[in-house]
Image (cartoon, helix red, strand yellow):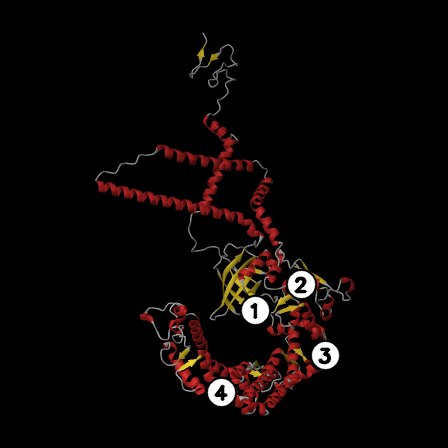
Amino acid sequence: MPTTSASTTRHQWRFYRCGGLDQVSIESGADLLALGQLDSKLWATLSCPTKGVELDEKTLHLVDSDQDGRIRVAEVLAAVAWAGERLRNPDDLLKRSAVLPLSAVNEQHADGKRLLSAMRQILKTLGKEQATEITADDVRSMVAMFAQTRLNGDGIVPATAASKEDLKTLIEEMISCVGSENDRSGLPGVSSVLVDRFWAELHAHDEWYKLLEADSKRVLPFGENTASAFGLWQELAPKVEDFFTRCRLLAFDERLAERVTGSQAEPPLPTMAMLSATGESVRALPLAHPSATAELPLTDRVNPAWADCLARFKREVVEPMLGSRTQLTHEDSQKLVECFAPYQSWLAKKPSSSVEKLGMKRIRELIAGDHEKRVRALIADDLALKAEFDSISEVEKLVLYHRDLATLINNFVTFLDFFSGKHQAMFQAGTLYIDGRACELCLRVEDAGRHASLSALCNTYLAYCDCVRRGMSEKMTIVAAFTAGDAEQLSVGRNGVFFDRRGNEWDATIVKIVEHPISIGEAFWSPYRRLGRMISEQVEKFAASGDKEMQARMSSGVAEAGKTVTAGAPAPAQPFDVGRFAGIFAAIGLAIGAIGTAVASVITGFLGLSWWQMPLAIVGLLLLISGPSMVLAWLRLGKRNLGPLLDANGWAVNTRATMNVRFAQSLTKVATLPDGAKRYLEDPFADKTRPWLTYFLILALILGGGFALKKRGAIKKWLAHRGNPPAKSSIASGTPSVATGTVNPASPAAPSVVGTGSAPVSAP
C-alpha cells in the first residue's frame, strides 16, 4: 500500500471540493500512472466487494487478482500499470469508451505488439478483416467460439475431445473413478493432475493384487469362495466366541448357570405374543445352550434367529475345512481363525482405491497398453493452444479496462461519480419511485437487519424494500435514502416501483424504516403535526369512551325495563340530579373562562405592540414552537454521511463522505408540475364541508377581543355612555340642576335644594 508523504511526492496533484468534501482530481493519464505516489490515506476507500456493485463482473474478476472477492489498493494500482503500459496514451483510459481502436495499442511494448496481433486475428476470424477497432462483444464472441472447440488451451480434455472411441471410453472411466474438472466449455474433463492420480491408483491396486497371486493357496483357502466364506465367518465369529466364553464360565463355577445361560444376563424377552425369530431380543441370546462340554451344535437346539446362518456356516465353511460334523469345538474355531488369518492380513493391505470397480483385467490392460501416453498427448495438444487463448483473454482484459477502469477509479480512489452527478456511482443500484418521489441513492443489501445496525449512523432517513421482479421469481433487497420531502406518508408495507440500472422493473415493498430528519421544512411542521395527532387521538379516545358508556347505559336501561315488565310493576322514575348538572356547567364555565382569559391576555399583549412589532412577535412565537425541532434537524442533516451505508455493505470507506443539505436534496427528486402547465383549482368533486375551524377561530378572536376590551375598561365606558347621556348645562340660565342634586352656585338669591324627586323645592 503506498504511503508516500506529501513532501516526497513528485507529481503535482489537484483537489476539488464537492458536497463539502475535498477529493483528489484524476484528470489525465499521468494522474492515473502516478496513483502509486498518492498517499493511501487520501484515497476515498481502501477496499470494496466485487458483488453488489454495478460494474461488469468480468472486469472486477480481472482486477481481483487473488480472487478473494474484494478489490484492494494494490490491485487497483496493478490494473492501472498493466493497462497504461499497453496503450499509447494512458489518457484513453479516462474516456470510458467500450470501443478500443487498434491504433491505441502500444506496439513498442512486447505484450502490446502481441495483443495487437491477437486483435487482428480475432477480427479476421469474425469476418471483420477491415475493422480498425474492437469491442468487448467481439472478444467474447471469439472466446465463446474458442471454448467450444475440441481443444481450447486450458489443459482439461473432456471425453468429446478424443478423436477415437477407445480414448473417449478411457476418459469417461477416469472421470467415474477420480472425478473431473470443468473445461472452458463447461464440460467435465480430466487434467494432468487427475491422470497422475488415476494411474497411481491403477499401479497400487495391481501391486496389492500381486501379493495375493504370490501366495494364493494360503490367502484363498476356499478358492473363489474365500470372500463369501470370510464374510460369513466375520458375521458369526463374535457369537461363536461368546458361546465358548459362556461355556468356560459354566465349567469354572456351576453357580453361574442362570446368568451364563441367559435367563438373567440378558434383557427380559417381550411377551410371547410378540416374539419373532428375527427379533433383536432373540438374536441377543447365545447361539445355543452353553454346557460344560463346550461343544457348539450346528443344527439341533440352536438359537432360531441364527439357525439359517449356522446351517450355511456348516455347509460352506466347516465341512470344506474340517469335514462333516454336527458340532464345533473351541479348538475347531481356532483352526478357522488361523485359516482366515492370511486372507484377513491381505485385505488389511488393500490400498484406498477407486479403480477397483474396473476389475483386474481392465486395470492390467490399461497398465500394459499405451493408454496413459495417449491421454497425456491429448492434454499436451490442448496446452499448446494456451498461449493463443491467453492472448485472447488479455485482449478482453485490455478492452474491459479501457471501458471500466476509469469508473472503478472514480468510485474507489475518489467518489467523483457520486458527488459530481455526471455518472451514477457503481454502488447505486437504481431508482425507487414511491410517494411522489424518485430516490436515486439506492443500494443492494443482503440482510436488512444486519445492514441497518450500522447504516443507522449515516443520519439519513432509510427505507429497506423487498423487491420482486414482475412475472419472475427473482428477489432482492435494497435500501433507499430519502433526502427531500417528508416522511408523513411513508410506512412499512407501502408499495413502490424500483428500476435497476438495466431498466428492469421491480415491485418494491417497504419492510423496515430507519427514521432520521429529512428536511428543515419537515422539522418546522412536525410540532404542529404531533399536536394535531395528539388532539385527534384524545378526541377519538373521548368519543370511544362516551360511546362505550352510552351503550352500557342503554344496555342497563333495557335490562332494568325487562326486569320491571317481568315483575309487572312500573319502572321508578330516575330523579333529576341538580347538583351533578350544576357541577358540569360550572366546570364548563371555568374552562371557557380560562380559555377566554388566556386568549384575552395574548390578544391584549399583541394589541399593545406597535405595528412593526406584531410581525416579529408572530415570527418569534413560531420559532418558539418549531425552533427546537428545526435546530435538531439542522444538526443531524449536517451529519449525513455516505460512509456507514457503504461500510455496512462491506466497503472500507477511508474518508468522511458527508452529504450537505443542498447535495443531499439532489439525490431525491420530488414531483413537480411541468413548466408551463396550467392548474385549475376548482374541484367539482370537492367535499362540501363547513369551515368549522374557521368559525372556531373567528369566535375565539371575538371572545378574546371582548375580554381585552373589558380588561381595558372600554366596554364599561361605552355602556355608560349609551345608558346615561350627559345633561345640558343650566349655569347660564340660573336654573337649578336636577341631575346633581346640589345647590346651583350660579343663583345665590334663589337657592334650590334638589331632592329625590324631579321638582325643585323653594325656600320660604
Which SS class for mark 4? loop
- Which quadrant is home to the C terminus? top left
Q: Nearer the viewer, mark 2 or mark 4?
A: 4
- Cα–Cα span, label 3 and label 4: 78 Å
The one nearer the camera, 653 or 188, is 188
- Residue type at mark 4 is Pro
- Cα–Cα span, label 2 and label 1: 23 Å
Q: From the image, tell me which residue sits under label 4.
A: 221
Q: From the image, tell me which residue sits under label 3.
A: 106
- Residue type at mark 2 is Ala
Q: In the visual, does 685 lie left or right of 656?
A: left
Q: Is residue 548 above or below residue 664?
A: above
- Cα–Cα span, label 1 and label 4: 76 Å
Q: From the image, tell me which residue sits under label 2.
A: 44
Q: Earlier in the sequence, mark 2 or mark 4?
A: 2
Residue 180 x %, y %? 56, 81
The quadrant where residue 67 appears: bottom right
- Residue type at mark 1 is Arg
Q: Give yes or no for contact between labels 2 and 4 (Cβ–Cβ under 8 Å).
A: no
Please give the name of the residue rendered at 58% of the width and 69% of the height, measured from the top-left corner: 51
- Residue type at mark 3 is Asn
Q: Earlier in the sequence, mark 3 or mark 2?
A: 2
Does residue 673 appear in the picture of this structure?
no
Q: Nearer the viewer, mark 3 or mark 2?
A: 2
- Cα–Cα span, label 3 and label 2: 31 Å
Residue 168 x %, y %? 54, 89
Q: Earlier in the sequence, mark 2 or mark 1?
A: 2
- Which quadrant is home to the N terminus? bottom right
